[in-house]
Image (cartoon, helix red, strand yellow):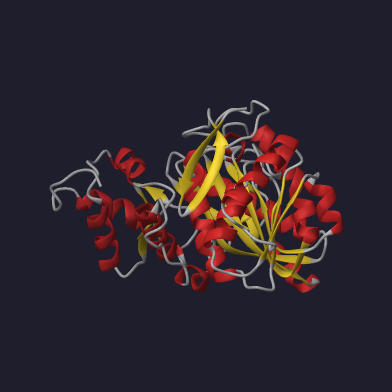
């Protein structure tokens, strides 16, 4: 296989010459590298700078080229011990070359093993599972291999099942019904977190989100795992279902499974998607290739802390009221003037979260037109 040297952040990487530039890419059986995932790796670098110390053992379990783990080791600034693993022998050799290329010392070890067997024998403070497609085959092993108080990070690129295109596949893989809607990426992410919480609870462990988001073609979760039956019960207590009436736009979180003739998604996570303290500690630095995007997303994530689940999209309200959509900033300002909370959301550039009752929101939306004068957001 021919290799090309690229640079992400301050890290040099050898990657396959025909690497994927954007989208989910295709599983060709070769060592996989996707340039579009640089944003997610930048986020991992920011997190490693604040969450990993010299006592931590960190595992990039499905490392491929080693891009994520090597960047965390090289740019994280901590003295944590890093382990990069991939059972593909060609990937293993490429990771070794990338470790050497960046001059990483004895604190970085490369393995060529099945990550599930590895996690049955070793324990880590940080475990990253970034597979091609669904992560369900590895989550149980990751939960068991995580030390008390440690972090499990998971990527899912099977967004079509999670976001309602293939609900039967979602039911098989995640034991949860998915739903097509204007907020389907949020319910898809919450289904993924809910699955993590249920898998952790099987082993009397709780699951607390630190940073969970949707970006490009994937969903990404960072959760803290804590031992204890009470913590497991607390996590399970934050599972529920999302009801949706596409005609009225009504959406609601309920604790009991609805009847089959209702449009709903779940079971899914109903609690916070992010930890506010963890987000406040993150700083997008100039060496990050996606610094501007990271700054924008970080601002949106921080704003979502404390916001209710299930966002609205301006376009669906425009269709419902048959009104020209106002500017997003104008709409949010008007909602706040009514004493309700309103924030933009990272899930959709035209999306926002609010606790204003739906009837009031529809009346406000219709009344905003004509006082604004500029359509769009």
Q: Position of residue 53 (x, y in %)?
A: 62, 73
Given residues 346 and 37, the one toward you in this image is 37
Which residue is pictured at 38% across the width and 55% down the height?
291
Image height check: is 181 above or below 307?
A: above
Q: Which percent across, then down, holds residue 349?
A: 35, 47
Count of number-bearing discs? 0
Tell whether 258 sits left or right of 346: right
* Quarter where residue 104 is shown: bottom right
Residue at left offset 86%, top offset 55%: 120
Give the x, y percent position of residue 96: 67, 46
Which quadrant is home to the N terminus? top right
Query: Could you tell whether 336 is left or right of 71 in the image?
Result: left
Compared across the picture, whether 361 is left or right of 153 comes to left
The answer to whether one can see residue 215 in this image is no
Name the residue: 69% across, 69% down. Answer: 56
91 to 59, vertically: above or below = above
Q: Residue at x 39, y 59 (%)?
A: 300
**Residue 343 seen in render:** yes
x then y, percent, for residue 101: 58, 49
């Amino acid at each position: 296989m021919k290799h090309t040297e690229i640079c992400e952040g301050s890290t040099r990487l050898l990657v396959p010459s025909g690497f994927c530039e954007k989208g989910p890419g295709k599983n060709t059986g070769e060592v996989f590298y996707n340039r579009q995932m640089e944003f997610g790796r930048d986020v991992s670098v920011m997190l490693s700078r604040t969450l990993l110390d010299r006592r931590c053992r960190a595992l990039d379990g499905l490392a491929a080229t080693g891009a994520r783990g090597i960047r965390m080791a090289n740019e994280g600034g901590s003295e944590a011990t890093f382990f990069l693993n991939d059972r593909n022998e060609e990937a293993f050799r490429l990771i070794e070359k990338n470790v050497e290329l960046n001059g990483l010392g004895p604190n970085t070890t490369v393995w060529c093993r099945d990550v599930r067997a590895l996690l049955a024998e070793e324990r880590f403070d940080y475990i990253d599972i970034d597979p091609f497609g669904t992560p369900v085959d590895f989550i149980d092993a990751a939960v068991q291999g995580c030390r008390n108080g440690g972090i499990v990070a998971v990527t899912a690129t099977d967004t079509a099942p999670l976001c309602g295109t293939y609900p039967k596949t979602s039911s098989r893989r995640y034991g949860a019904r998915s739903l097509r809607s204007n907020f389907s990426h949020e319910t898809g992410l919450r289904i993924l977190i809910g699955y993590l919480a249920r898998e952790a609870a099987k082993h009397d462990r709780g699951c607390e989100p630190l940073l969970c988001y949707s970006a490009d073609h994937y969903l990404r979760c960072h959760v803290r795992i804590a031992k204890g039956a009470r913590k497991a019960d607390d996590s399970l207590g934050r599972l529920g279902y999302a009801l949706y009436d596409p005609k009225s736009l009504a959406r609601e979180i309920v604790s009991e499974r609805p009847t089959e003739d209702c449009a709903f998604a779940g079971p899914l996570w109903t609690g916070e998607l992010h930890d506010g303290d963890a987000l406040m500690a993150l700083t997008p630095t100039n060496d990050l290739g996606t610094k501007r995007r990271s700054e924008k997303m970080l601002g949106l994530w921080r704003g979502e802390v404390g916001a209710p689940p299930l966002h609205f999209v301006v376009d669906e309200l425009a269709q419902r009221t048959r009104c020209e959509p106002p500017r997003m900033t104008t709409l949010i300002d008007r909602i706040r003037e009514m004493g309700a909370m309103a924030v933009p959301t990272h899930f959709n550039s035209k999306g926002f979260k609010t606790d204003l009752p739906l009837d009031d929101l529809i009346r406000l939306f219709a009344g905003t037109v004509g006082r604004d004068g500029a359509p769009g957001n």
